[in-house]
Amino acid sequence: MVIGVFALLGLFVLQKAFAPRELPGAREIYAALVIWTTMTILLDPHGVVLSRTTARRVLLWCLIFIAYLALVPLNPVVYPKYIVGDVASLLLPAFFLVCGYRYRDLFFTLPTLTRVGAVLAVAALIALAFPDETGRHQPPSLLLIAMTWTWFMLSKTRARCLLAGLAVLVLSAVAWISTVRTNAAMVLVAGALVYWLHPRLRYSVLLGIPALAVLLVARVGPIRNRVVGIVLESRFKTIASGEGDESLLGRAVEMEDVIRTIQREWPPWRYAVGYGHGSTYEPYKSYMGRNVTSEDRVHNIHIGPSMVFFRYGVFGIVLVSAMAWLTLRELLRIRSEWRLGRAEPIGIVFTTTVALYGVYFLLFNSIVDPVFSYAAAGCLCTRSPGWTRYQDQHHPAPRSLLEATAG
């Protein structure tokens, strides 16, 4: 059953690499992933061993968002496909979590994580050969970025450190070539987060390479001219030339439309719970033809907090804030344990990935990414008492991010 989960997750990632904007195929694979994880749980419910607290939290999470279906009939227009998609994206992390307690290989072993990383790396390289109609490529996954930095930070020998550092630089180049600027920036954000978790000279050197590159570009005329030429031919040109960025302006206009829809359509009680699953807003300014329904409504909202408030109100914002606090608390725990020499690769990878998705969430709705669902469930699993017991029973165990970076 675990093989099926990983096969579908890998298929989704590879499909996005070959066809980044082809939604029908991605939706079908996503649906298959939800169905497969559900069947994995239902076919062997007695094999799932959850603590009472975890079971209650999972059940409460599922019941809350199932209860939100009661708001659907009150919406101006109802779109079943959007409702199903919203519910599935919120329940998938819970399904992954329960599957993880049934099949420990889903999260608890480094060989598994290494194989996932290999698939993500292959997908990132394949994507370079398949741009969409705008010239953009599917960027490297945030899980792959977190995994590569973790490999680098835990490397114990000079050879491993150099190899992992090279991998970080290659990943940075792939993210740049994709021309998805947010992901290119996330490589540096991940590096800064790693440095904060465990400051060491080697991280300073690798993080200093971009600064050195900027200095070289600024000082050496031929290099400067060539780099400026490349930048001005890419989607980074608006940053380099000081122009207004079309993508960011589009998100700002989208937020204006969401706010206007709220002002025109919401009674006071809606502010507490939002519009619910499958909700849509009326585009006054952000009129993108391919996103607009026949009733002149739009479902997709890019900016995460705006999307959460529109669909789930103040309750949703409180829930997201609580998740952010839990992630920060987990990062602080990792930082503290690392100082004591108790760094654990799996927990670091999943927690760092969730933190990166949290930053990404400010500009993109990352909840719909099944890789986020997998990482979020992994982060919760590695915080559980069951994870501690599993570590004790299987210690020592690496065979991982290249033998847990040997030494």
Image: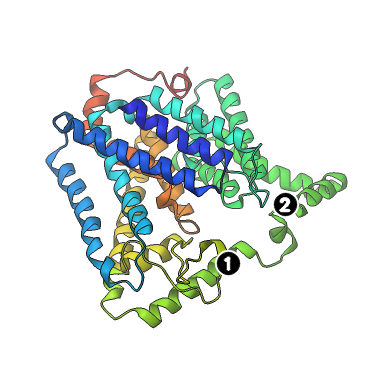
Q: Residue at x 46, y 61 (%)?
A: 300
Q: Secondary structure at mark 2?
A: loop
Q: Position of residue 287 (x, y in %)?
A: 56, 70
Q: Is residue 364 above or below residue 341?
A: below
Q: Secondary structure at mark 1?
A: helix
In whole angstroms, how far apart are the C-alphas of marks 2 and 1? 18 Å
Q: Position of residue 315 (x, y in %)?
A: 27, 65
Q: Single out the residue that lies furthest toward the right.
A: 222
**Drawn side of residue 330 relative to residue 250, left or right:** left
Q: Nearer the viewer, residue 187 or 97?
A: 97
Question: How packed is label 2: few (under 14 Cα within 10 Å), some, or many (20 or more)?
Answer: some
Q: Quadrant of the N terminus?
A: top left
Q: Is residue 132 above or below residue 114?
A: below
Disc 2 target residue: 234
Asked whether residue 289 appears in the rendered view, the answer is: yes
Question: How packed is label 1: few (under 14 Cα within 10 Å), some, or many (20 or more)?
Answer: some
Q: How is the image coloured?
A: rainbow
Q: Position of residue 214 (x, y in %)?
A: 72, 48
Instruction: Tell me which numbered mark, 2 or 1, is placed earlier along the sequence.
Output: 2
Q: Say which amino acid is labelled 1.
A: Gly
Q: Residue at x 19, y 54 (%)?
A: 63
Disc 1 target residue: 250
